[in-house]
Amino acid sequence: MIRTRFAPSPTGYMHIGNLRTALYEFLIAKSSGGKFILRIEDTDQERLVEGSVDVIYETLKLTGLRHDEGPDVGGAFGPYVQSERKSTYMDYAKQLIESGHAYYCFCTKERLAEIKEQNASENMVKYDRHCLSLSKEEIEKNLADGIPFIIRQNIPQTGSTTFHDVVYGDITIENNMIEDQVLIKSDGLPTYNFANVVDDHLMEITHVVRGSEYLTSTPKYNLLYNSFGWNIPTYVHLPPVMKNQTEKLSKRNGDASFGDLVEKGFLAEAILNYIALLGWSPSENREIFSLEELIENFHLEGLSKSPSIFDIKKLTWMNGEYIKNLPFEKFCELALPQLKTSIKRTGVDLAKLCSYIQSRLETLNDIPSLVDFIDTLPAYDTELYVHKKMKTTLEIALDSLKMVLPILESDTCLDEHALNDKLLLLAEEKGIKNGQLLWPLRTALSGKPTSPCGASELAILLGKEETLLRVQKGIGFLTK
Ligand code: GLU
């Protein structure tokens, strides 16, 4: 059975690239009836940020990437938090020391810094393997004396390591280019480099999906798998998500995280759909996929090694499509909180307003600027009344506003349809175009070049009193 894992470090920030990794891991597992596992990689205690595990849970919940096993849901391969597996790593590291594939290193920080400094001119400074030649007695004495130590991997000095990656193909690295990497740090915790191998093996992970920055480390991991006599997983390394041609999307540059995008009014489903296409091409020419459809259509061959650029305009467009296609109830649920904080005027039919704005939004955060005129009529220019195509001049606009006033004053127009019928009838009687009557009214009521609905809808939404006030104001304005 295929088993994939999402292994984020709790940094408090869900990078778009990390979320894409999680999505592909989910899709690889789910498209073959496999399991998707969440593992928290918190061995780098200095990088820990409080509350950040919640960001991970929240993201997976919002996006629907439901994990089958993990710290919060349990499973047969736990614990799923690396800091809770400390003794396991130590046991395995000692096993490697026994078999000669690892060794204790007692070098002080100062000594290591010196090596670096002395060889500063070289491209790559490797540890000089000083402690590899310590005698058994020396090692035992040091341990008995409580001298701090780390454990290093004993990398073969000759030969090369080749491995296959689903996206990048065959990759070969000369062993002498690899440093005797640290497996266990002085705090007794494993490095990522060691923990990922032990955990992926123990958790029976079949496909390891991660960023291409791990490609060059993979030979070290494979040497570890070989030292233990374990099976090597299938590797799927992914190119970075770029901000432009040369820069990666990054937290350091303040680029938006998943959480930031949600706060900016993007829907989790749209974000997920968009990032699915950053590095994967479906076999048919199509862009909108629900998560279910992604599971049905996903195939590893569609993954590409050329980096893609995160295009916020494209995401914005896609988000608009998702908003349009939301079931109306669901849209109201999402839009109402924003409408309630944006509109203070009483008596406005918010459900009706929802139906007017649903097809006009690209993000939920467009709502306030779309409806701001409802509370206060913005200051506007009389030019707004002019509509060249409809041959509406300022004079015609003024006449029209005067003509509609009696209709608006009468109590017979209880809904927008009845009002609209009356207005159209009036236009016919007066022998003018519908637009010549409706455009000035729409302008007087909204004070904007565009509004979420037409003149009659606006009038009903605003209510009789406010409608009359605004039309009278328009008349005054045009009379000057
Ligand atoms: N904890 C690593 C990270 O957040 C995971 C890398 C991996 O998936 O192996 O980058």
Image (tube, grey):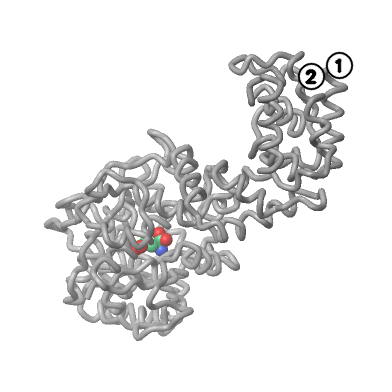
Secondary structure at badge 2 equals: helix
Label 2 beta carbon within 8 A of ligand 1: no
Tell which residue pokes out farthest to the left in this image.
159
What amino acid type should be assigned to the residue bearing mark 1? Thr
The residue that appears at 65% across and 18% down in the rendered structure is 387
Please state if 5 lies on the left or on the right of 15 as rendered.
left
Label 1 beta carbon within 8 A of ligand 1: no
The residue at which mark 2 appears reads as 398
Q: Is residue 307 above or below residue 238?
A: above
- Whole-percent x and y of residue 456? 70, 38
Crowdedness near tag 1: few (<14), some (14–19) or many (≥20) residues, C-alpha within 10 Å: few
Do the residues bearing badges 2 and 1 touch, measured as CB atoms within 8 Å?
yes
The residue that appears at 50% across and 69% down in the rendered structure is 57
Write down the quadrant of residue 36 in the picture. Answer: bottom left
- Whole-percent x and y of residue 261? 54, 50
Per the rendering, the mark at residue 479 is: 1
Q: Is residue 450 visible?
A: yes
Question: Going from the N terminus, do you reach mark 2 or mark 1 first?
Answer: 2
Please state if 65 lies on the left or on the right of 332 as rendered.
left
